[in-house]
Image (cartoon, rainbow, N blue to C red):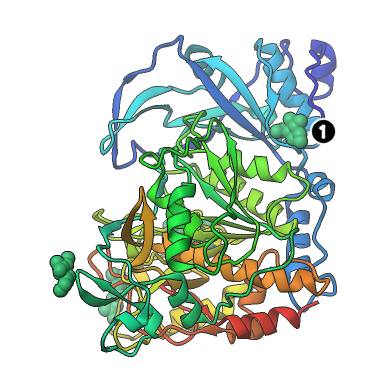
Amino acid sequence: MVAITFLRLAALVSACAGVIGSAMVSTLQLHEARKGVPAGFSLHGAASPDTVLNLRMALVQNDFPGLEERLYDVSTPSSANYGKHLSKAEVEQYVAPKPESVTAVNAWLADNGLSGTPISAAGDWIAVQLPVSKANKLLGAQFSVYSDDATGRQVIRTLSYSIPAELKGHLDLVHPTITFSDIQPLLPVVSPLLQANPQAENIAANPNAVPASCNSLVNNKTAIVITPACLQALYGIPATPATQSSNTLGVSGFLGQFANNADLNLFLTTFRPDISPDTSFDTQTLDDGQNSQDPAAAGVEANLDIQYTFGVASGVPTNFISVGDNNKDGLFGFLDIINFLLNQTAPPQVLTTSYGANEGPISPMLVQNLCNAYAQLGARGTSILFASGDGGVAGSQGGTTCSDFVPTFPSGCPFLTSVGATSLPDSGIETAASFSSGGFSNIFPTPPYQKDAVDAYVAGLEGAEYNLTAKFNQSGRAYPDVSAQGVDFAIVVNGVFNLVSGTSASSPTFATVIALINDHRIAAGKPALGFLNPFLYSSAGASALNDITTGANPGCDSTGFPATEGWDPVTGLGTPDFAKLLAAALALP
Ligand SMILES: *[C@@H]1O[C@H](CO)[C@@H](O)[C@H](O)[C@H]1NC(C)=O
Ligand SMILES: *[C@@H]1O[C@H](CO)[C@@H](O)[C@H](O)[C@H]1NC(C)=O
Ligand SMILES: *[C@@H]1O[C@H](CO)[C@@H](O)[C@H](O)[C@H]1NC(C)=O
Ligand SMILES: *[C@@H]1O[C@H](CO)[C@@H](O)[C@H](O)[C@H]1NC(C)=O
């Protein structure tokens, strides 16, 4: 850990050293700006000059390209260093700011009567409190009150800010400034399931081609409902308990949500009577994250996520991380949870998150910085999975008018695995769920591991009945990478059975498969899989997935992307085939 000290440099010394001192007149240079107020927000009025802002500042990392190279080196199956994940200290060596950056930023703050507190283990993030009036002067900004049209939530943001010219190359970004995001749980549909009846023998005739365990009685009619037994049948997920106590599956929760033990208990008694109802998950809280266990206050999203991780990843130690919104920074703790996990010596080997937003309203520099944080955790050996979003090509929630397709965050980050959704029709042949978000980032270029797969898909679109190429950024990182069932999952919320749908269900399901595979790898004396994508896109990885070739994700007045043979921006490479994935994973060093 790099200690940040706040020495006030003498003006002469700092001038000689080329950093900012009080004797120098510093020129502010525009750092980030937005063309106007993003859709969905309105200017409410001026911010009170005395309101104290809790700004966070990122210092430029000394060698992120070096870290990226190491990430690929330890994650690419053909590399001699596959699986040789980095330690906490090794990662921090790459991302800690250079001493001259620390000196320059601290001198600037000190000259303005301010000081920063480190909020990341590597010292690349600091927190600084200052009133609006001072922030406006320091950053050539105009912090104002904006309100979210949908929720009425008010935030203090600026449409642009500048930093002293001398700090370019030292100060990466200031947050929250031009970020107007609205991160949401990705859970669009909840409907009550009147009877939970997973016993196939109670269903007179099996009228469809799906596994018997995928039929339940809903309103006295046979309906296809996803339960743990159904997922086990569809994907070959074993019911045998995992054995390795060092293997952990992390589940993140935001916005005051927590997972309820009593609901999990009823879920297990109903759907997994073979799992002892006395076992449970652990909860960690951060930023005043909630965990009252009041069943009426627990979240639908949190309950879904824990029921389909703990309830399917039999015996894998599972951690729910409940993150509060102390910082009110529009990111609902995304920055905090990643800094929290990067500060652990043994972070979970798998992390699943079913929350997201659209990429556009977030500061591009912040998007890059967070993505780099996922690379750091990936280099440590964590597989990071995110739900791709529920708005088809129209973004994370859809429902917006759009002509160009709307990419989602953080799925556009190349250093994580984005999970789309499928559904199970009567034919028993998995098809793309129409809400499954997929597309191309406007910030990150296509990474090498997916270039061939994406090029082949885009080439297939040309001349097809679809004229979509003008609606997305062909040079961008494309997502999702994989998919899993996401329609009509049976869950328990506040003692009642419900059906829920969304990529929110898909990400925990895929995470469960990876956690169970890690159990076998660890038992065989091998490291966890870590950053998955180079393996998944390799021929061994891709052929261990069920290719989904039907359906599409409409939106923005278009048919959306069609699912096709091979990778596509609806279902990625496909859904898990446990036995094949396990064999391919165990063949890796
Ligand atoms: C990292 O964790 C240690 C304890 O494990 C704690 O003392 C320290 O404050 C943490 N650092 C940050 C930046 O959160
Ligand atoms: C289901 O069927 C049973 C027996 O036929 C009947 O008593 C019950 O009211 C039905 N429930 C619903 C929700 O229709
Ligand atoms: C398209 O994506 C690239 C990154 O691959 C980015 O540099 C460029 O700005 C994007 N174009 C638009 C119009 O957003
Ligand atoms: C597809 O759309 C682009 C942009 O709108 C247009 O220039 C092009 O002519 C269209 N191609 C076809 C085959 O319709």
- Camera sees residue 358: no
Placement of the N terminus among the 4 image quadrants: top right
- Camera sees residue 575: yes
Q: Within the image, what quadrant is residue 163 found in?
A: top right
Indicate the position of residue 94 as horizontal and vertical percent values.
Answer: 79, 48
Query: Who is closer to the viewer here, 67 or 74?
Result: 74
Indicate the position of residue 450 as horizontal and vertical percent values.
Answer: 58, 74
From the viewer's perspective, tell me whether residue 491 is left or right of residue 253: left
From the viewer's perspective, tell me whether residue 339 is left or right of residue 189: right
Q: Amino acid at mark 1?
A: Val
Indicate the position of residue 445 as horizontal and vertical percent values.
Answer: 56, 63
Q: Is residue 228 above or below residue 337?
A: below
Placement of the C terminus among the 4 image quadrants: bottom right
Residue at the disc numbered 1: 2
From the viewer's perspective, tell me whether residue 344 is left or right of residue 483: right
The residue at the point 29 percent across, 82 percent down is 203
Indicate the position of residue 335 as horizontal and vertical percent values.
Answer: 58, 40
Q: Is residue 438 above or below residue 251?
A: below
Q: Is residue 586 above or below residue 102?
A: below
Query: Who is closer to the viewer here, 269 or 103?
Result: 269
Q: How many marks are shown on the rendered structure?
A: 1
The residue at the point 50 percent across, 55 percent down is 306
The residue at the point 80 percent across, 61 percent down is 85
| Quarter of the image where ligand 1 sits | top right
Q: Within the image, what quadrant is residue 397 found in?
A: bottom left
Check disc 1 and report its element: helix, strand or loop: loop
- Badge 1 crowding class, 10 Å Cα cut-off, few under 14, some 14 to 19, many 20 or more, is some
Query: Who is closer to the viewer here, 472 or 380?
Result: 380
Query: Who is closer to the viewer here, 156 or 200?
Result: 200
Q: Is residue 438 above or below residue 28?
A: below
The residue at the point 78 percent across, 71 percent down is 523
